[in-house]
Structures are given as structure tokens and as C-alpha cells.
């Protein structure tokens, strides 16, 4: 089998070939590495490619498969990990200069779950610095390009993971989603990405951006892979106090081609000003397709949509300003070359180590937590968050799922977003409220625009309703 | 000093809780240990690590709250206190600001001017920081994170104290309660109990409080008393000379008996407190509180009553022995071994207290074993040791926890009960002191004391004084 044929497989397909001894784990790993050799120069999906480690791991996994001591459905399939998840012994940078030399001593729980299931880690993917951004342009290690069109961004912050999947440089990847960081780049790169209910996947070892919003999820070629990967990474973890005990994590059982009677709401608020006409047409066509398969589609008013972005930036930045305080040049990471005294060492290390978008958010977060502003900004944002959750609760009394676009546009051209950060922030309008409410949501491809850039369809479920999302997304995907 | 001034004092007391593991990870809380050996990704602030609350910490905090008449907050939360310092690995401390676990309590103290209730504003849980070690030689600082994440409670009093005496009484009371609960060993010298003193002065009768200062680095009760005296005088001097007291944090140097300003209110940091998103709120049920209440150990008053009924001790003994949990534990352990509780009590109240005072030690610094004290008591009971020698042996026990049986043997200290030897020594004393013999025979019975002394001296102190007395009387009758 040619390398190209191998890299074209989905994760689940490849796992079956590996189990059937048609492809060895080493061959699969080599295929991914070869693809990386061919395309990385153009795309730059990875911060670190661990060739030796991956091939060594592949050998080990193959041995376990040969001894029949590894039965997991994804055993032997090479995966790429977003560079904000700790991997013991492997560089973990958050695409920041301040962690340019940071090698963790432990592995994130979600990654460990994959390792236990026989995954082969190919490397660590590029991202917006500390997951702050929507384009993967704020990385300290260069821009990642959209594999569909190199003049465009892949989205972000999990842009490297989505580009690696789209460019077949891995079979699936892990991303993290704080305000849309899995779904929006999945939409821009034409892949499928799922953000689970908050608490479903352990955050232990995920370098925090906004702790109350962060969630790890799968990025893959299709819905089947997303369900299989989520099944593998979801776990109750005593090391994460916000982790939830769930007994319904058999997500692949929801891969059923049937939406008859499913009630799906489309928020009118999501179809108004700012939404690109081609995106709107594609999303409504997708709704139509689901309707034809038996779903009951209805438009409704979700309300409060315009408050989600300010509330999100206040909460996420407040948490980030505290979460990122530990990067100070004392214990690990970058320390300024020359400084006099502790105060200057802190100041210079952080000034030189963080990029402008991270600094902007740390300053914003520090400001809203300052005495005299806490009530006016932070508390108000928390109240807004609670109201947004209530608005979703009301919607889910009526609907099984909410359908809409993932992003208002397709991928913008490289360089066009950072000039106007406020406009960039507005691009998160459809994804952010999902994080504020802790809900699960998926983005899957629903066509392309006139330039051939992918458009993403977003399906949002109530808390713990990933299975409904998977079922509807799978049904749509089957056509 | 022309006017009368009143001193107003409130205390912030930090107590390290006696849990085996840290507040947010499984690392050991043991004191000492090679630097950075009791650490993990959580207590060293590694990226991606997350805190998990140690339930034992909550239970200790509730127990202290119940014993100090606090109301327990049923829905309590942790908050982050943000500040940069290298001993604080995350550059924020997980503490409680908005919903502390205990509020509105009080303890009763007793001083020379009678009984008084001191209010407790709140008790909150938090994590301790690491330790910075400044290497003057290499001109650098090193961090030891062994203490990072050790659980603390901070007990914040109301400004209800008016003198150093009241402060010491309050601290003594808190220490006793917490030790009785087993929630902490409360050792000031090891830092497991630390007190910051907030102090202001005002003219007697004034309704408004004066401007207060906060005093840090107080490592003993004596230092606290000295610092209070000095700060009170410093503030009065300022006021008398027409200057203003500045609200600031000061550091006490006990060797120089002087404090200096660390930071003023103007450069007070904005800690940017906000709810800790990595921890879920702690919900405390009635059932949980009842369970902790039912497990509360015997407190001082109950113990005092039991000592009187079970061991037949007088009021005075029961009071002294229960003044410290360590002393009470030592008493009970020793009494169990030697069946003479009153004698155990005598040794603890007499010699032990004398030596503690002489050496400026606290009862928790006692390190001799109950077994050795029990052995000493049985040596005195069977007449093997007279009381003078026994006191010497006890000092050795107190200092080095020696085994008295072996010690007495190897040093030849055993009382001589050989009647022949005693009789000849007594005979000699009679011969050498005809004046005393005459006095005695003339009815001056006290004169025999001198003869006993002489006989004892001849026996190098190792005689049984009762026996010597008896023999002398017998010989003098002749």
C-alpha cells in the first residue's frame, strides 16, 4: 500500500487495517512522517515532530498488538497533540517564547488516556500563543498556513492540530477549546472538531488559559473518528476537581444515520448582521438536508448573543492573567539574559517572553480584577454568563440541538486579522457562548465558498448530550 | 505622658494543620527534609497542574470553628490571591476571601483582671508558601518548596484585646484548643503557629479607633509581649509629639527589640482576588458537621473533671496538668504505667515545670518518655532512691531521656539499705557531735535533723533518710 493511500485513511479505518495486519503501526507512523516531510515546509503545523520517539513507540505498540495485550479501537494510530498539553520528556511550549525550553515531567491525563490506548504521538502542534487568538498567527514559532489555501490562516487557536489533520500529517489530533479554538479552525480547515461538555475530559496537564472554559476535544477527518477519540479521552480524573463522573461515554454508539423527529433550532440571532452570505447559504442548506432526513427545523430567538463576547473576554482574560502569572523566569522557561534584582528579572523575562496578544489579555484581565473594577466588570461578566446559560436552558427545553454556523466567515487571509483585534474577537460570536454555558458542540464541513475555502456547520447540544450531536452530525455526513 | 491611652489589638493567627499530606496534593507535610523532596507538579506550580482539596483540612477547620463557637459557612469557596514572589510558585495563593469556612466566633480568656470574651471575625483555609534561602556567599537565592502547599488556617480576631497580657491569654487559649483538637502542634519556634499583631492606640474613652499598624515576624510569646509594648510606646510617642501614625506593616527584630516599616498602605498590593476556578465550592452538610462534632475530643474542662474522679487528683493538680495537651497526654501515659497518679502529677507539676521555666521551654518541647518517668517513680517507691538523688536522676531523664534503672546501676546511686553500714555511720555522727546529742536529749527534737544530715553526708547521700532517722532515734535512746 502506498504512503498516500495510508495517510488518506481515517483513524478508525487505519486502526482496523492495523488490527487486520494489513498495515503495521511502524508503516502508519512512517507514512505520517513522510507526509510531514513533504508538506511541513509549506504549512508549519508542528512545533515539534518527534520522529525517533514516534517510531520507537510504534514498535512498542506493534509488539503489544502482536501479543494481543492491546485491544483498544484506536491502537497504533498516530496522533498529533496541541502544544499546550504536557507530554513527559517532550517539549511543550504553548507556542510561546516563555516556554521555548520547557520539558514537562508528566503527561496530561487526556494524552495519557490515548497513550494507554496505544496511540503513537507524532509531535506537538502549533497554536496561537497560550491559545489566545483565532488564526495561529500569534505563535512564537511562525504562522501555520491553511492546507486548503496557503494564503489563508487555518484559524485558531488549535490551528496546527486542524491543519495537520487536513494535510494528512497525522490521523487525528487533540485540540483545546476555550472560546471556539477547536471548532473555528476545524471549520476553516474543513475537518471535524468536537468540544465536549465542560468536565468530560480531564484538564490535568492542559496548560490553562481560561480554567472555567477550557476543554480538550478531538479533531479528526470525520464524525466517526471524533466519537471514537472522545470515547478514548473522556474520563473522570481525581486530579481535576472539575472533572465529572459520566457513565454515558460510549459515544460511538451514537453513530446512527437517523434524525427522524429530532427537534433542531436555528437561532435567528446567528443569521443576522456580520454573517457571510455564502456561509449562511451553506448552513441553511445543511439544515435543509437534515430536515429532509426527518429532523424538525425551526428558527427561534436565543437572545443575549451580543453579550457573550464581552463576558467571555472579561472572564477568560481575568483567569488568564492569574494562570499565566507562574511564567516568571524563576522555575522554568525563559529568563531574561541580564537583569538587576528580582523585580527587573520578572519584568524583563515576561516582557521579552510573552507576545503582544498575550500581554494584551493579561493587562485586560488584571484590570477587570483590580479593586474598584471587580464588581463592575468581573462580577457583571459572571452574571452575564449565568444568564446566557439560562437562555440555552430555555432553548433546550424545546430543542434537541441548536444548529448554526461555526464562524461568520471562511478563513481570512494571513495578516488581515491582527490589525484589528476587536474584529477578530467578533469572529468568535457563534462559538463563545457555548463555552460560557459549558455545552458540547461540533463543527463539521458543510461545503465551500466560491474560493474553495471550507465552511463549518455547528451543532450545539445541551450538557451531556454529545450523543445527540454525534448522531445528527453523522447523519448529515452520510448525506 | 500627659494623657491616658488605650491600646487596641487584633490578631491574625496562622496555624499549620496537622495533616499527613498537603492541602492540594498528596505530598508529605513533614517538617524538614532535604530541599524540594516533598514536592510534585502541583505544589511547585508546574504548568497544567491542578489543585485537589484535602478533605482533612476542611474537617480540621470545622473542628476549630466549632470549638471557638463560630458559625460554619455551609457553602464555602476558595479564592486566588495574586502576588508575585518566588516562594509562591504559581504567583497566586489559594486562600478564602469571599466565603471563609468559619465566621463570628469567640473564645473566653482569663487574665488578672478577670474573664473576657474575645471575638473571632473569621477562620479561613489557605496554602503555605515555600521557603527562600538566601545564599550570601554565592549572592543568590534558592527556593525550597517543601512547605509550599502545607495547609494553614488563619484565625482573624476582632480588635477586642487591650493589653499584651490579654493577647498572650488569647494565644494560649487558642493554642490549647487547637492542640486538644489535634489539629496542629502549634509550635511557635517551628512556625506551625504564627501571629501577626494589629495594634492602634487611642485616648482613653475615645469612640474611634486610631490608625493601626501590623507587626510581623513574632516567633515567641515573649517576642509578642515585647513587640506590643514597644509598638504601643512608639505610637504614643508619635501622637504626643504631634505626628501621625502611618498605616503600615512593620517587622519586629526581637534581638534589637525594635521594629521597622516593611510597606505602607500606599504601596499595599492589589491582590486581585477572584474565585478559584480550578476548585469546586465546598458544601458542608449538617450531617458532616454533626459527625465532626461527635468526634471532638475531650476538652480541658471535661478532662479536669475526669482527673479528679478517675485519678483522685486535687483541683489544683487537675488544672495545672490540663493546661497543656502535651502535659496531660504525658500524665495519662505515665499514670497508666505506674499506678501512682498523684506521684506522676507531683513530678510533672514540680520538677518538670521547674525545669521548663528554668530553660524557657514549653510543655510541647518535653521529649522524655512516660516509661522512664514511671521507672523513676517505682525506684523511689521501693526505696531504691531517696528523693534528693531521684531529683538528680530526673534531670538526666528530662535532658536526655535516660533509662533510670540502668543509670542508677551504672552510677552506683542506689540507696544503701544495709542496716549495719547505716548504724555505724550513725554511731560515728553521734560520737562526733556531742552538742547535738545533748540538745536532743534535753528535748530539742529538731537537733536530730543535723545528725541525719551528717549521717547522709557520710553515706554520700545514698542512704534512706527515713531509715537513718529511725536508727538515730534508737541509738540516742540508749
Image (cartoon, grey):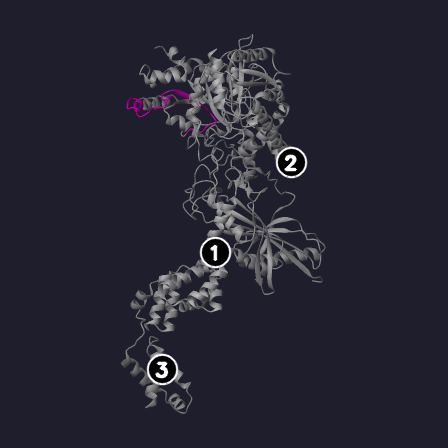
On screen, residue A99 versus residue A381, left or right, reads left
- Cα distance in 3D space between marks 1 and 3: 46 Å
| 1 or 3: tag closer to the N-terminus | 1
Residue A406 in the image: above or below residue B249: above
Residue B314 pos. (x, y %): 47, 69
Rendered image: mark on residue A375: 2
Q: Are the residues under marks 2 and 1 on the same chain?
A: no
Rendered image: mark on residue A173: none
Residue B184 in the image: above or below residue A453: below
Residue B48 pos. (x, y %): 47, 32
Specify the quadrant of the image occupied by residue B416: bottom left
Dot 3 alpha-carbon crowd within 10 angstroms: few under 14, some 14 to 19, many 20 or more:
some
The answer to the question of whether label 1 and label 3 lie on touching residues, with beta carbons closer than 8 A, is no
| Residue matched to label 3 | B469
Q: Chain of mark 1?
A: B
- Cα distance in 3D space between marks 2 and 1: 42 Å
Instruction: Mark 2 vs mark 1: give the one in front.
Output: 1
Q: Magenta span covers which residues?
A: A63-87
Helix, strand or loop status at disc 3: helix
Q: Chain of mark 2?
A: A
Q: Residue at x 58, y 54 (%)?
A: B106
Specify the quadrant of the image occupied by residue B436: bottom left
Towards the viewer: B192 or A409: A409
On screen, residue A38 versus residue B405, left or right, reads right
Helix, strand or loop status at disc 2: helix
Q: Chain of mark 3?
A: B
Is residue A467 in sight in this rendering?
yes
Amino acid at each position: 500500500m502506498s504512503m498516500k493511500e495510508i495517510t488518506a485513511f481515517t483513524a478508525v479505518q487505519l486502526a482496523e487495517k492495523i488490527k487486520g495486519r494489513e498495515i503495521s503501526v511502524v508503516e502508519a507512523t512512517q507514512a505520517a512522517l513522510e507526509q510531514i516531510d513533504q508538506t511541513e515546509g509549506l504549512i508549519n503545523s508542528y512545533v515539534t515532530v518527534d520522529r525517533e520517539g514516534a517510531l520507537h513507540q510504534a514498535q512498542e505498540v506493534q509488539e503489544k498488538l502482536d501479543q494481543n495485550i492491546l485491544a483498544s479501537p484506536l491502537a497504533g494510530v498516530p496522533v498529533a497533540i496541541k502544544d499546550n498539553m504536557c507530554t513527559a520528556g517532550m517539549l511543550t511550549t504553548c507556542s510561546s517564547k516563555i516556554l521555548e525550553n520547557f520539558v514537562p515531567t508528566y503527561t496530561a491525563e487526556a494524552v495519557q488516556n490515548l497513550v494507554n490506548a496505544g496511540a503513537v504521538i507524532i509531535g506537538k502542534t502549533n497554536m496561537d500563543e497560550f491559545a489566545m487568538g483565532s488564526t495561529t498567527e500569534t505563535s512564537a514559532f511562525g504562522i501555520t498556513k491553511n492546507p486548503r489555501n496557503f494564503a489563508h490562516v487555518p484559524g485558531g487557536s488549535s490551528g496546527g492540530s486542524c491543519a495537520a489533520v487536513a494535510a494528512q500529517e497525522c490521523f487525528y489530533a487533540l485540540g483545546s477549546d476555550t472560546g471556539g479554538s477547536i471548532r473555528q479552525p476545524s471549520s476553516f480547515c474543513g475537518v471535524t472538531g468536537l468540544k465536549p461538555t465542560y468536565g468530560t475530559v480531564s484538564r490535568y496537564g492542559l496548560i490553562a488559559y481560561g480554567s472555567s472554559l477550557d476543554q480538550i476535544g478531538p479533531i479528526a477527518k470525520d464524525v466517526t473518528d471524533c466519537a471514537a477519540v472522545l470515547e478514548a479521552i473522556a474520563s473522570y480524573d481525581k486530579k481535576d476537581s472539575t472533572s465529572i463522573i459520566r457513565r454515558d461515554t460510549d459515544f460511538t454508539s451514537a453513530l446512527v444515520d437517523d434524525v427522524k423527529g429530532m427537534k433542531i433550532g436555528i437561532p435567528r440571532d446567528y443569521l443576522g448582521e456580520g454573517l457571510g452570505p455564502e456561509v449562511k447559504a451553506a448552513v441553511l442548506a445543511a439544515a435543509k438536508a437534515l430536515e429532509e432526513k426527518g429532523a424538525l427545523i425551526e428558527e427561534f430567538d436565543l437572545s443575549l448573543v451580543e453579550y457573550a463576547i464581552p463576558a467571555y473576554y472579561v472572564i477568560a482574560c481575568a483567569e488568564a492573567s492569574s494562570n499565566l502569572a507562574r511564567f516568571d523566569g524563576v522555575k522554568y522557561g525563559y529568563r531574561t539574559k541580564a537583569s538587576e534584582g528580582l523585580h527587573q528579572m520578572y519584568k524583563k523575562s515576561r516582557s521579552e517572553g510573552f507576545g503582544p496578544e498575550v500581554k494584551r489579555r493579561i493587562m485586560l484581565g488584571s484590570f477587570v480584577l483590580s479593586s474598584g473594577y471587580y464588581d463592575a466588570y468581573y462580577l457583571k461578566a459572571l452574571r452575564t454568563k449565568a444568564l446566557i446559560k439560562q437562555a440555552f436552558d430555555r432553548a433546550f427545553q424545546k430543542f434537541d440541538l441548536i444548529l448554526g454556523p461555526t464562524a461568520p466567515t471562511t478563513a481570512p487571509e494571513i495578516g488581515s486579522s491582527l490589525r484589528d483585534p476587536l474584529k477578530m474577537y467578533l469572529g468568535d460570536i457563534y462559538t463563545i457562548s457555548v463555552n460560557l454555558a459549558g455545552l458540547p458542540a461540533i463543527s463539521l464541513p458543510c461545503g465551500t465558498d466560491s474560493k474553495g475555502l471550507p465552511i463549518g456547520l455547528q451543532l450545539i447540544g445541551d450538557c451531556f448530550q454529545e450523543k445527540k450531536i454525534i448522531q445528527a452530525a453523522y447523519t448529515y455526513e452520510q448525506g | 505622658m500627659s494623657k491616658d491611652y488605650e491600646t487596641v489589638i487584633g490578631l491574625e493567627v496562622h496555624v499549620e494543620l496537622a495533616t499527613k499530606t498537603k492541602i492540594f496534593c498528596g505530598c508529605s507535610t513533614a517538617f524538614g527534609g532535604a530541599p524540594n523532596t516533598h514536592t510534585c507538579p502541583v505544589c511547585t506550580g508546574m504548568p497544567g497542574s491542578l489543585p485537589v482539596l484535602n478533605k482533612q483540612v476542611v474537617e480540621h477547620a470545622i473542628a476549630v470553628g466549632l470549638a471557638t463557637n463560630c458559625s460554619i459557612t455551609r457553602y464555602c469557596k476558595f479564592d486566588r490571591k495574586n502576588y508575585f514572589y518566588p516562594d509562591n510558585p504559581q504567583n497566586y495563593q489559594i486562600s478564602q476571601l469571599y466565603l471563609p469556612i468559619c465566621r463570628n466566633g469567640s473564645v473566653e480568656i482569663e487574665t488578672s483582671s478577670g474573664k473576657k470574651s474575645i471575638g473571632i471575625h473569621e477562620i479561613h483555609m489557605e496554602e503555605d508558601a515555600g521557603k527562600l534561602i538566601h545564599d550570601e556567599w554565592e549572592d543568590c537565592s534558592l527556593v525550597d518548596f517543601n512547605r509550599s502547599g502545607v495547609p494553614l488556617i488563619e484565625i482573624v480576631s476582632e480588635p477586642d484585646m487591650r493589653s499584651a497580657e490579654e493577647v498572650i491569654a488569647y494565644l494560649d487559649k487558642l493554642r490549647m484548643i487547637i492542640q486538644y483538637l489535634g489539629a496542629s502542634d502549634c509550635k511557635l519556634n517551628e512556625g506551625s503557629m504564627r501571629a501577626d499583631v494589629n495594634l492602634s492606640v487611642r485616648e482613653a474613652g475615645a469612640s474611634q479607633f486610631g490608625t493601626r499598624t501590623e507587626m510581623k515576624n513574632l516567633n515567641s510569646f515573649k517576642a509578642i509581649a515585647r513587640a506590643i509594648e514597644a509598638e504601643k510606646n512608639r505610637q504614643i510617642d508619635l501622637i504626643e509629639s504631634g505626628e501621625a501614625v502611618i498605616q503600615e506593616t512593620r517587622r519586629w527584630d526581637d534581638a534589637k527589640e525594635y521594629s521597622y516599616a516593611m510597606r505602607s498602605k500606599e504601596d499595599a498590593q492589589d491582590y486581585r482576588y477572584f474565585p478559584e476556578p480550578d476548585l469546586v465550592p465546598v458544601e458542608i452538610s449538617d450531617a458532616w458537621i454533626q459527625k465532626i462534632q461527635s468526634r471532638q475530643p475531650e476538652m480541658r474542662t471535661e478532662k479536669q473533671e475526669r482527673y479528679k474522679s478517675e485519678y483522685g487528683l486535687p483541683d489544683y493538680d487537675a488544672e495545672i496538668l490540663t493546661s497543656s495537651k502535651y502535659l496531660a497526654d504525658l500524665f495519662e501515659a505515665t499514670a497508666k504505667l505506674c499506678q501512682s497518679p498523684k506521684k506522676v502529677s507531683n513530678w510533672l507539676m514540680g520538677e518538670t515545670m521547674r525545669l521548663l521555666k528554668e530553660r524557657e521551654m514549653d510543655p510541647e518541647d518535653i521529649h522524655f518518655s512516660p516509661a522512664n518517668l514511671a521507672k523513676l517513680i517505682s525506684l523511689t517507691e521501693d526505696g531504691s532512691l531517696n528523693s534528693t538523688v531521684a531529683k538528680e536522676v530526673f534531670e538526666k531523664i528530662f535532658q536526655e531521656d535516660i533509662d533510670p534503672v540502668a543509670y542508677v546501676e551504672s552510677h552506683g546511686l542506689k540507696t544503701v539499705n544495709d542496716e549495719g553500714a547505716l548504724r555505724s555511720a550513725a554511731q560515728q555522727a553521734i560520737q562526733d557531735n556531742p552538742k547535738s546529742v545533748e540538745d536532743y536529749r534535753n528535748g530539742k527534737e529538731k537537733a536530730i535533723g543535723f545528725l541525719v544530715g551528717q549521717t547522709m553526708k557520710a553515706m554520700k547521700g545514698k542512704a534512706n533518710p527515713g531509715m537513718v532517722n529511725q536508727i538515730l532515734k534508737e541509738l540516742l535512746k540508749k
